[in-house]
Image (cartoon, grey):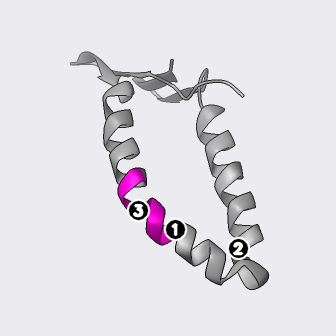
């Protein structure tokens, strides 16, 4: 599995504007880690209590969500309408 994307480049171009914006996604990783650490006891307790009914299924969903997030690296979205252009790249 690869690492999740670290940067997002958004470019908006039309007749009057040409805007390029770099967003550092890696700055959100410590915040996400803090939230996970705070919620980890509640999540583990819920998994232990409900293991027979939906605990195993929820672990599979969590793993699929992590894999999908890591697969975003290299994603390119290019939308054009007439003279307008929106281009998003995950690096």
Query: Is residue 14 visible from the viewing direction of this image?
Result: no
Q: Quadrant of the N terminus?
A: top right
- The reply, left or right, for residue 56 in relation to residue 70 is right
> Which residue is depicted at the point 75% across and 59% down?
60
**Residue on which disc 1 sits:** 43
For residue 54, side relative to residue 30 (left or right)? right
Q: Earlier in the sequence, mark 1 or mark 2?
A: 1
Q: CA distance from mark 2 to mark 3?
A: 16 Å
Element at label 1:
helix
Tell me the element at label 3.
Answer: helix
The image shows residue 7 at horizontal and vertical percentages of 41, 20
Residue 63: horizontal and vertical position, in percent?
69, 50
- In the rendering, which numbered label is found on residue 55? 2
Q: Position of residue 15 (x, y in %)?
A: 28, 18
Could you tell me what secondary structure mostly forms the magenta stretch? helix
Q: Please tell me which residue is depicted at 68% across the width and 41% down the height of the picture.
A: 67
Front residue (pair 38, 9): 38
Q: Quadrant of residue 29?
A: top left
Give 30 or 20, whichever is nearer the viewer: 30
Where does label 3 land, which residue? 39
């Amino acid at each position: 599995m690869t690492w999740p994307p670290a940067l997002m480049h958004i470019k908006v171009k039309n007749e009057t504007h040409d805007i390029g914006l770099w967003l550092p996604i890696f700055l959100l990783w410590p915040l996400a880690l803090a939230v996970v650490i705070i919620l980890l006891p509640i999540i583990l307790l819920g998994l232990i209590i409900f293991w027979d009914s939906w605990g195993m299924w929820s672990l599979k969903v969590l793993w699929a969500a992590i894999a999908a997030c890591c697969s975003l690296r290299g994603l390119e979205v290019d939308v054009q309408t007439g003279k307008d252009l929106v281009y998003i790249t995950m690096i």
